[in-house]
Image: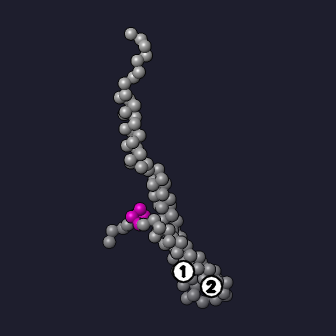
Amino acid sequence: MPARTVAAFDSAWLDKMVIKLQSMLAKQIKRAEEALKKEDNDPNSRAADARTLASLERMLERLAAMEQARALVRESKLGKENPRDALERRLDKLAAATEPQPDSGKP
């Protein structure tokens, strides 16, 4: 399956997903903190905690990359001008350039 770019997703849907991911991430971090507070030195639980923390780190990196990419998309959308307005401005310029110049009164 081909990878989809950030621009290919609906912006409103992506906003909801980012909020949902942030919420899930906060819950997982809280669980990890609570697990660290317990004085459980069992090697299996420490290994599970390490895997959870590694997963959280990857999720944070992906979320940060997604937010960066979305910020670039938003900037590029804001920088784009309405094509109709651009055309109108160009036509006005051309019309002004081709209008006959008023006679300055010199022979």
Q: Which residue shows up at 49% across the image and 72% down it?
A: 17
Instruction: Tell me the quadrant of the picture where the N terminus can be found.
Output: bottom left
Disc 2 crowd rating (10 Å Cα; few below 14, some 14-19, many 20+) is some
Picture disc at residue 52: 1
User: Percent x, y for residue 2?
Assistant: 33, 68
**In this view of the protein, which residue sits in the foreground, 29 or 36?**
29
User: Mark 2 = which residue?
Assistant: 35
Q: Which residue shows up at 62% across the image and 85% down it?
A: 35
User: Percent x, y for residue 88?
Assistant: 39, 42
> Which of the two discs, 1 and 2, labels the residue nearer the N terminus?
2
Which contiguous range is marked in magenta? 5-9
Q: Is residue 72 above or below residue 4?
A: above
User: Percent x, y for residue 34?
Assistant: 64, 83
Q: Which residue shows up at 42% across the image and 64% down it?
A: 6
The secondary structure making up most of the magenta span is helix
Q: How is the image coloured?
A: one colour
Q: Quadrant of residue 48?
A: bottom right
Q: Amino acid at mark 2?
A: Ala
Residue that sits furthest to the left in the current view: 1
- Total marks shown come to 2
